[in-house]
Image: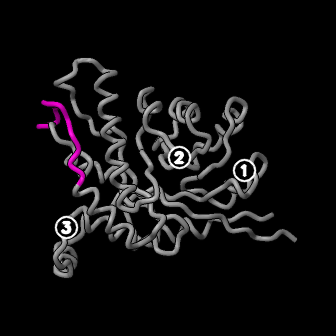
Amino acid sequence: MNKRRNLPVWSFGGEEPDPDVPTLAAWAGRQKDVDCDLLSFKIERSLGDQKGIDRLAYGGMFYKDRVYDSLGGIRSGFLCEEPWVRPESLRADASRAVAFSRKVWAVLPSPAQLKIEDGIFHDREEYESVLCSLYGLMMREIRDAGVYGTILVGEQFSTIEREMLPGRRVFLHSLSGSSRAVSGILEVQSSLSLPAHRLPVIPDLLDEYEIRSLSVIDGTEKDFSGLLTYFDADDLTAGGLSPGGGKNYWEGISSHAFVLV
């Protein structure tokens, strides 16, 4: 008889809707002597919804505003002077998140996702290199505040982003999972995350790249069972990227996170 084996459930962040005014007001009234705003609320609520899963993460594309505001030298979407990092809000968010889990991860939109126009360098490679260096500083600030690692999300990552950003606790995730984006990611990291509907590309990828571990976003037990042809159960995790917040989403991810071995 086959035995059920539960898979770890990992968060890749997601989107978080705006609360209604009474909910936000009640939450704000409980915040004593701390700086907070709407994004602080979203971080706290999203992590609360993830309670019980194996790896919590806060952020996603909605966190773009925080990252944008943490970079100095930008006005109206244009880089107008030599940029710098303003890390205070990032550190405050990190400290709030660490209260939920010592192994919490942050999910940041990649530099390209900020859509900042270059008005200083007039050289694409230099401009991207500077932005990536600033991201390195921001991620260090987050780690120093206790966050375990960072997931960078985007549709596709440029050569410079792939060269400068990945690290032992920095993970690249393509939201679309397109073949070109995934191939680029596998040039620089051996762990991969894919939306479940992109799993048919796995055999072709394995012909060309070494994939040591795979996280499946929104996978079902059927998806995980099919992957046992290519991976050991130890190398699989169930990923979630919440499209609109809520505990029900994470409960659904957890309910499918198993294989029969």
Q: CA distance from mark 2 to mark 3?
A: 31 Å
Most foreground residue, 174 or 150: 150
User: Which sits earlier in the primary sequence, circle 2 or circle 3?
Assistant: 3
Magenta: main secondary structure? strand
Q: Position of residue 42 (x, y in %)?
A: 29, 65
Q: Is residue 86 magenta?
A: yes
Q: Nearer the viewer, residue 71 or 143?
A: 143
- Expressed as whole percent of the image width and height from the top left, the position of residue 235 reads 69, 53
> How far apart are labels 3 and 1 at the CA level?
43 Å
Q: Residues within 10 Å of mark 3 (few under 14, many from 20)?
A: some
Mark 1–mark 2 Cα distance, whole angstroms, equals 25 Å
Query: Do the CB atoms of the residues marked 3 and 1 lie less than 8 Å apart?
Result: no
Specify the quadrant that holds the N terminus.
bottom right
Magenta segment: 74-87
Q: Is residue 199 left or right of residue 132?
A: right
Q: Secondary structure at mark 2?
A: loop
The furthest residue to the right: 1
Number of the label disc, if any, that sits on residue 168: 2
Q: Is residue 159 above or below residue 165?
A: above
Q: Are marks 1 and 2 in contact (CB under 8 Å)?
A: no
Q: Residue at x 58, y 35 (%)?
A: 186
Instruction: Identify the element where label 1 is drawn.
Output: helix
**As drawn, 258 above or below 213:** below
Is disc 1 surrounded by few (<14), some (14 to 19) or many (20+) residues within 10 Å? many
Report which residue position mark 3 lands on: 36
Q: Mark 3 vs mark 1: which is more N-terminal? A: 3
Residue 124 position within the rendered picture, expressed as x and y whole percent measured from the top left: 30, 21
Q: Nearer the viewer, mark 2 or mark 3?
A: 2
Describe residue 223's horizontal placement relative to residue 170 as left or right. Answer: right
* Residue highlighted by disc 1: 227
Q: Residue at x 34, y 49 (%)?
A: 61
- Mark 1: amino acid: Leu
